[in-house]
Amino acid sequence: MGFNKERERLQQLLEKIKTAADCNEANTQVLHECYQEYAKVIAVLYKKHPNVFGNCYNYDRVEIRGNKKFLKESFSEQARETNFGIYRDSLINSTETAIQYITDFL
């Protein structure tokens, strides 16, 4: 089907996200790039099936974007590490959810 391509892209993103475990500039950049790619894939899926991917498009993207903002606004190192973990976890959960939606509903 046409959704295997998107599922493969999301699975590759998930692996890339999981490798970014430490809070440093390189891993932060990896997460930002993964978020950009995630947003593109979700937009494509949402255009094809808005009923299935509406939550991913409307809520998960906004949550991740908010976590990204908190990470950028972090001043202390401890807050930065905490917000990095939250940002990373929300990106992982959203990507896994999108993969599950493709597997279960399409």
Image (tube, rainbow, N blue to C red):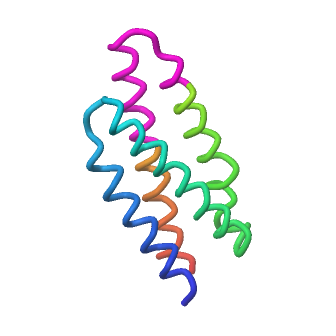
The span shown in magenta is 70-90
The residue at the point 70 percent across, 50 percent down is 58
Residue at the top extreme, as displayed: 76
Q: Quadrant of the N terminus?
A: bottom right
Residue 40 lies, with reference to residue 87, above or below; the image says below
The residue at the point 42 percent across, 25 percent down is 83
Residue 43 lies, with reference to residue 4, above or below; the image says above
Choose top left, top right, bottom left or bottom right for residue 16: bottom left
The residue at the point 37 percent across, 58 percent down is 14
In this orientation, which residue lies closer to the viewer: 104 or 7? 7
Judged left or right of residue 65, residue 25 is left
Residue 50 lies, with reference to residue 89, above or below; the image says below
In this orientation, which residue lies closer to the viewer: 55 or 24? 24
Q: Residue 104: where, in percent of width, then height? A: 50, 75
Q: Quadrant of the C terminus?
A: bottom right
Residue 48 lies, with reference to residue 92, above or below; the image says below
In this orientation, which residue lies closer to the viewer: 100 or 13? 13
The residue at the point 39 percent across, 45 percent down is 30
Judged left or right of residue 100, residue 47 is right
